[in-house]
């Protein structure tokens, strides 16, 4: 049971580590694109 629980916890942590960078990346791309468009217009 301990090994199984440890595997589940590691999978959850790995999933969070994988999904978190994607959400921050998309958010960063959105903000950088907005800033880029502003500078291009100016």
Image: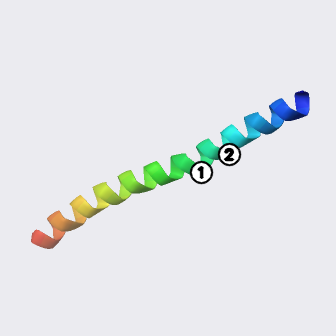
Which quadrant would residue 37 be assigned to in this image? bottom left
The residue nearer to you, when weighing 28 against 12, is 12
Residue 30 in the image, given as x and y percentages of width and height: 30, 56
Q: Position of residue 4 (x, y in %)?
A: 85, 34
Q: Nearer the viewer, residue 32 or 42?
A: 32
User: How many other residues sit within 10 Å of disc 1, few (<14), some (14-19) or many (≥20)?
Assistant: few
**Circles 1 and 2 in contact, beta carbons < 8 Å:** yes
Mark sitting on residue 18: 1
Give residue 7's quadrant in the image: top right
Give the side of residue 37 with respect to residue 17, left or right: left
Q: Position of residue 38 (x, y in %)?
A: 15, 63
State whether residue 2 is above or below residue 34.
above
The disc label shown at residue 4, or none: none
What crowding class fits label 2: few (fewer than 14 Cα within 10 Å), some (14-19), or many (20 or more)? few
In the rendered image, which residue does mark 2 sit on? 14
Q: Quadrant of residue 41?
A: bottom left
Instruction: Identify the residue at horizontal 82%, vertical 30% (top origin).
Output: 5
């Amino acid at each position: 049971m301990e090994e199984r629980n440890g595997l589940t916890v590691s999978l959850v942590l790995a999933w969070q580590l994988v999904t978190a960078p994607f959400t921050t990346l998309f958010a960063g791309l959105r903000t950088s694109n907005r800033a880029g468009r502003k500078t291009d217009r100016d």
